Image (cartoon, rainbow, N blue to C red):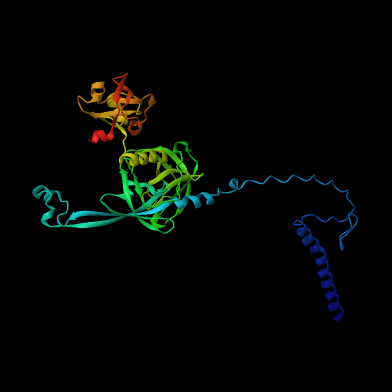
Amino acid sequence: MIKRLAWSLVLVAAGFAAGLVVTAPMRTASGSRTDATPRETPASAPARGLPSSPARPALPASPALPAPPALPASSVGSPDFTRIAGQAVKGVANISSLQVERTSNSPFGDDPFFRYFFGDQGDLFGSRDRRSLSLGSGVMISPDGYLVTNNHVVGENVREITIALPDKREIRGKVVGTDSATDIALLKINVSGMPVVPWGDSSQLKVGEWVLAIGSPFQLSQTVTAGIVSATGRANVGFADYEDFIQTDAAINPGNSGGALVNSRGELVGINTGIFSQSGGYQGIGFAAPSNLARHVVDDLMKYGEVRRGTIDFGVDRLTADLAGEVGVSSTRGALVSRMFRNSASWNAGLRPGDVIVSFNGQAIDDASQLTRMVADARIGTTATLKVLRGGRTIDVKIPIVSSSARRR
């Protein structure tokens, strides 16, 4: 019994020692993969505890590969906007506009039945002031305190405007001028030496180009979001009469209106205006007025207190497939002349309702909104040449471009 137990202990000890001999080289080999310079073992030296094997001829060393060139930081991962954002946020302010509107205390409100019999007799029940607060953003465009924002941020019946600057100062501002057609407004505060966001050329924007949206969404001032230019020249989105928007997927939310859209050089290329949303929040479709348009509006507001743009004395509508069939054209490209006055300059020049305008001063017209923009940008006092389709024929009509302010008077 004692001999049998002794032999068992000897066999267990021998097996344990053999296991150590087999596993030790595996750990060493595994560890050698992380060494900068692998250790060489003479071919004639067998591993301890393992049977020896014939020596193999040494393989020639592989030539060292050149180290790959270092990639610039901008090409690794996402681009770095820290410097641009840090500078641009200094020129974007928070705007609060207090608006006061006098409303009637009438229990009937705007009931058409009551108004039919009694007219606008709001004084019968007295009236009260209804206050509302509009919040948005603005961009500093000059060191002496001029800011550009959206017209809908300023609102109507403005009683008080407060500009909250990035340095925490709150200053009363005044309205220099507004333009509802483009939804642009110009404000002024009495300060000097303010940091500005330099103007950029929005006509050079490319789809896919990186842009930053800076503003105060939900009153969170100096918020920066990044995205790309999704499209340019967007129209018929319902934000303004004159529409030539930049579309971006940079996050724009309520309160961003009037804020800056800057390019990768930190230049102002757009004024954030609105979003397309079914929930009221960000869905990746935002719109900004191009900087070239905003700059033209600002220049006119500074000089004249209003925007002087070209206009025409007839109305146009979008050419749908049904309307194209009615007027006898095969394409929906162009602008349909829908209304005009007899004895107007355009009537006397030969234009008629039902004509389809397909060219303005030699440039092709895709839709009515494009024609409206081109007329507005035309120099006042000049004569424009329209190419018109009528009854299967193409004719040229020359019409005068007059000032929109003259038309209002």
On the image, the x and y values in percent for residue 388 come to 32, 22
In the displayed structure image, the side of residue 324 where residue 83 appears, left or right: right
On the image, the x and y values in percent for residue 394 come to 33, 19
On the image, the x and y values in percent for residue 168 come to 42, 59
Q: How many numbered circles are shown?
A: 0
Instruction: Assign the N terminus to one quadrant of the image.
Output: bottom right
* Residue at (81% x, 70% y) in the render: 16
In the displayed structure image, the side of residue 304 where residue 51 appears, left or right: right
* Residue at (44% x, 46% y) in the render: 261
Q: In this view, does 348 lie above or below 281?
A: above
Q: In this view, does 177 lie above or below 28?
A: above
On the image, the x and y values in percent for residue 113 come to 12, 49
Residue at the outermost bottom position: 2
In front: 283, or 239?
239
* Residue at (46% x, 41% y) in the render: 200
In front: 94, or 272?
94
Q: In this view, does 48 lie above or below 8?
A: above
Q: Is residue 228 above or below residue 313?
A: below
In the displayed structure image, the side of residue 34 where residue 48 appears, left or right: right
Instruction: Assign the C terminus to one quadrant of the image.
Output: top left
Query: In the picture, residue 123 is in which quadrant?
Result: bottom left
In front: 2, or 400?
400
